[in-house]
Amino acid sequence: MNFLELCKQRCTTREFIEKQIDKDDLDRIMSAGRVAPTACNKQPQRIIVVQRPENVFKVQKAYQTFGSQCILIVCQDKRDALIRPFDEKCSGDIDIGIICDHMMLAARELNIGSVLVGLFDPHIIRKEFSIPEYIEPTVLLILGYPTNGFLSPDRHKTERKPLEDSVMYETYNEDRSL
């Protein structure tokens, strides 16, 4: 399938069957994250792959896992962060988003569902997985095989704003009549 079709096929999955992800498939997903671009090629990602039941339980203390047998704790190394000098914006969150997007698309290509979670307790994750202070738990990427399949790629026709509602050319302008 072409890239836009793959993008349309990807959807959030919040209910997984109890099945481990094949190691080759997981390696392919991780490789997609590895080749993702990062600011100045800093590659801040540090990813903890959680698959053992006792470690899945540790993640569940910080956030629900929807029955998944595979959770990626995606962290960023803050020791060599690229900081924009004008406003102190760190590129790490953007980098992690790009990396996770690559992994979610790779997962979908393999018929593996995903949900990206930022609303978890990082203090619990840090403690349970012995993460040092300079490593920031940024998101959980929960992977697995969907219980009820995938959403229709046609949902974007009604669930997404049309381009003209969010894209402007040459300057910011909310008045669409210009």
Image: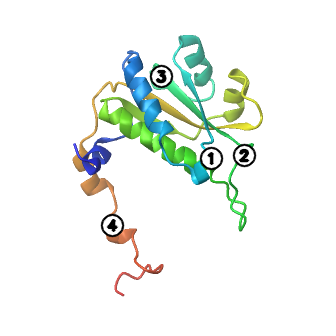
Mark closer to the chain start, 2 or 1: 1
Are the residues flagged by discs 4 and 2 in contact, CB closer than 8 Å? no
For the residues labelled 1 and 3, the Cα–Cα distance comes to 26 Å
Q: Residue at position x 77%, y 35% from top?
A: 133
The residue beneath circle 3 is 70
Q: Disc 4 versus disc 2: distance between alpha carbons?
A: 37 Å
Which badge, 1 or 3, comes first in the chain's sequence?
A: 1
Question: Which residue in the structure is indicated by mark 2?
Answer: 80
Q: Closer to the camera, 132 or 116?
A: 132
Label located before the other in sequence (1 or 4): 1
Check disc 1 and report the residue beneath it. 42
x then y, percent, for residue 168: 40, 75
Kindly state the secondary structure of the residue where label 1 is placed.
loop
Q: CA distance from mark 2 to mark 1?
A: 7 Å
Q: CA distance from mark 4 to mark 3?
A: 35 Å
Q: Which residue is mark 4?
A: 163
Mark toward the start of the polypeptide (4 vs 2): 2
Q: Amino acid at mark 3?
A: Cys
Looking at the image, residue 61 lies above or below residue 91: above
User: Can residue 169 be seen at all in this image of the molecule?
Assistant: yes
Tag 2, which secondary structure? loop
